[in-house]
Amino acid sequence: MKNKILFILFFSLTLTLSAEQIGISKDMVSANIDFEGKRYVISRGDENNTYITNAYSLTSRPSPPFFIQPFQVTQKVETFGELEVIEFLEKQKGIFIDARLSNWYKKSYIPGAINIPFKIFLSDTPQRDDVLESFGGKKLANGSWDFRSAKTILLYCNGAWCGQSPTAIRALSKIGFPEEKMKYYRGGMQSWQLLGLSIIEPDKGDK
Amino acid sequence: MRLFFILLLIASFLDAGKYNKVKITSEIAYLMVYHKGKAVRVHRIQDIKHRLTGGYDKITRMCPGECIQPINVHTGVQTVGEVEVIDFLKNKVSQNKGLIVDVRPQEFYARETIPSSVNIPYALHSNTTVIDKLFTTLGMKKQDDNSWDGSKAIDIMFFCDGLWSDKSSYMIEEFIKRGYPVEKIKYYRGGFQMWKVLGFTTIKSQ
């Protein structure tokens, strides 16, 4: 009896001491991502109330250039939500691309994402060739591309009002990259942070 | 006479231009809808310094309870974003060919909601009397064997708080279980939070 009381006391004490971790989904509290030789944990933080106050709390951005993007970029490019992004990263299903300009990426990005600014996809340059080859594409003698063994790529940018990743996807589609091998995370940095999901902030010591 | 027309043209141009600073899409700056019989102009907040406040800026949501929802709620049910919601309000709801439903509790709907939406709290999803009545209103026909004929049913779009809310999914599952045609159901996953995040017009209680 005494032991039982002690146990309950101990148990309730540990509960009050540690702020409870918020789950991602019903079956997942956090996810481990292996990226560039390091392990990152994606989680939703703890129960201490936080609010969005950074640039992503701004509701209205001047148009042009900012317009709300359609839910789908093209019919065959699948749109992902956060759970699908996390599964893609956990199971290492392909290349995760932050399509924003590098000054944005340097501030903050989603763990597992490499930065390939959308502008690279817009013109035929040696730089673009390198990127496409890193995806598994092969440039043919006539200048066209063979993407049969290309990896699947998942692109995002700042969010629903950002046209950068859709622009990159359309440009890739134009040169024959299979739409079934492209995924679009429309919620982007904004939805990711609204949900409290982990980001990497290089300026704040994250690496 | 010609001058009058030119002035009228300029006046309407100026009025339309009022919502051009922060447009919805490249073609659409605003649209007119009806909410409870009153005409409402739906646009985005034009102040580019405006920030999200008032509850929907809150990040901390507890899961279990407020877990992140998958992108698809049910096979065959189309998930949509704001561009498709706008199109739905314009071409379906305004023409009585579609219904947009806020499934949040009544007090949330009363406080603030998406223009032209109606409120069917998700807690009513298992109430057969309510659903039967609703189905009839939506153009469903009850057959002799008690099943529903959905061939004349109108399109219906559901939303709730947003990415971390499963309220829409309860209602959608129930609709499908009872025979509503899957292809006539749409899911606005971003929900009221994303509507607020993007600075859209809302209906507030007076």
Image (cartoon, rainbow, N blue to C red):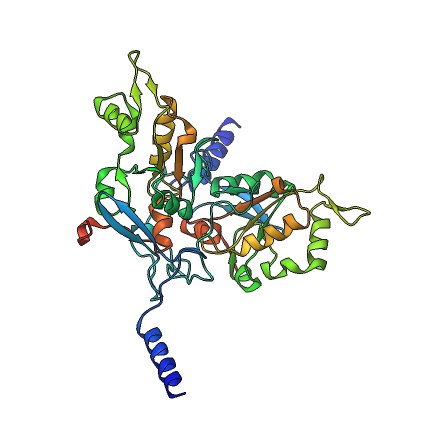
Residue occupying the far top of the picture: A142
Name the foreground residue: B106 vs B146.
Answer: B146
Q: How far across and down, in percent of the image, does residue A54 sit? A: 29, 54
- Give the tally of numbered discs: 0
Q: How far across and down, in percent of the image, does residue A107 sit? A: 22, 47
Residue occupying the far right of the picture: B144
Q: Is residue B111 above or below residue A16?
A: above
Camera sees residue A58: no
Q: Is residue B67 above or below residue A183?
A: below
Q: Residue at x 26, y 34 (%)?
A: A116
Q: Is residue A177 above or below residue B166?
A: above
- Residue A65: name its quadrant: top left
Quarter of the N terminus of chain A within the rendering: bottom left
Q: Residue at x 30, y 36 (%)?
A: A99
Q: Is residue A86 above or below residue A121?
A: below
Q: How far across and down, in percent of the image, does residue A171 sit? A: 35, 26
- Residue B126: name its quadrant: bottom right
Q: How far across and down, in percent of the image, does residue A189 sit? A: 33, 46
